[in-house]
Image (cartoon, rainbow, N blue to C red):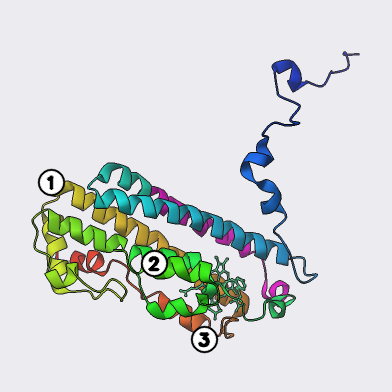
Amino acid sequence: MTDAKCPFNPEDDGAEMRFDGRMSYSDYLSLDPILNAQNPISDAHDEMLFIIQHQTSELWMRLAIHELQAARKLLLAGDTRPAFKMLSRVARIFEQLNSAWDVLRTMTPSDYTTFRETLGQSSGFQSWQYRLIEFMVGNRNPAMLKPHEHREEYVTPLRAELTQPSLYDVALRALAGSGIAVPDVVLSRDLTQMYQPSDAVKQAWAIVYKDPQKYWELYELAEKLVDFEDYFRRWRFNHVTTVERIIGFKRGTGGTSGTSYLRKMLDVEIFPELWHLRTDL
Ligand code: HEM
Ligand SMILES: N[C@@H](CC(=O)c1ccccc1NC=O)C(=O)O
């Protein structure tokens, strides 16, 4: 017979075992509030999945906002290298959000209908962080402020964002700063309004793409932006496909036409000229 195995005691290896009065893992990460914030309002088994899927998405969005904020500031100061690193991270965050749909897709229409009614009129349409990301990168529709007006703490950062140049506005300033002509009406546009694409800006970016060696930093910046929009479009596409799979063509709880509204959003271009210039190369 072989000797009975003694379980390994990590304490012998020096593992800290007592945390009275010291900061532990849960303390540092504020896990108590986070893990006590899942409050299903029905008895449906899948409501927990639905809540966690949204909460984790909002956490990743929180990080995306943090990175975008810093990247924009660095770009304005002409410090492009660390800004590029942050923009790459934001694209990866969206890749992460895209993979997360695989978990939600395990919920069937039969599962979802067991608790959909309890959601009332609440909807992702009212995600203020999602709208902030859209505003930050440059997709600014001031009509989207309205569903947030009932809470000062949501609408204030959204309104404040509309007074700042978006990520695309900052990129256009960098383009102009390199000596490539960008019309003044574009550079001094009303930041609170939707960006209006123009041929002049398309031609300005085309100069960069026709001579990447000469304009390497702008070329890299433009490609980082396209990369971001690429992942963002995939998120939208995964969303609408999952929605169609789960609720078909029902109206949304947020009051929109549902999949038809979400399909319309697939046509939104955040950095329009960066896509359109490609036809002319
Ligand atoms: C069962 C799963 C889901 C269904 C059936 C669903 C359905 C919908 C529908 C129908 C809309 C249109 C607005 C409305 O009238 O309600 C919408 C918008 C939205 N949803 Fe979802 N959704 C689901 C999951 C998610 C998840 C996991 C997220 C992640 C945060 C999300 C975020 C959003 C956002 C941000 C919008 C606004 C999009 C825009 O205005 O462009 N949804 N959703
Ligand atoms: N708009 C969805 C409801 C929904 O998905 C939702 C509801 C509350 C919180 C987040 C949600 N997610 C995305 O829209 C629906 O019409 O079924």
Separation (CA) of disc 3 from disc 2: 29 Å
The residue labelled by disc 1 is: 213
Q: Earlier in the sequence, mark 1 or mark 3?
A: 1
Separation (CA) of disc 1 from disc 2: 37 Å
Q: At x 88% / y 17%, what residue is drawn?
A: 4
Residue 155 location, x and y as percent? Answer: 48, 71
Residue stretch rendered in magenta on the structure = 88-112
Q: Quadrant of residue 143?
A: bottom left
The quadrant where ligand 1 appears is bottom right
Left-right relation of 146 to 274: right
Residue 63 location, x and y as percent? Answer: 48, 52
Please tell me whether mark 2 sits on a helix, a strand or a loop.
helix
* Image quarter (top left, top right, bottom left or bottom right) of the N terminus: top right
- Residue 143 on the magenta segment: no
The residue type indicated by label 3 comes to: Ser
Q: Nearer the viewer, residue 20 or 36?
A: 20
Q: Nearer the viewer, residue 55 or 251?
A: 55
The residue labelled by disc 2 is: 160
Q: At x 71% / y 62%, what residue is drawn?
A: 48
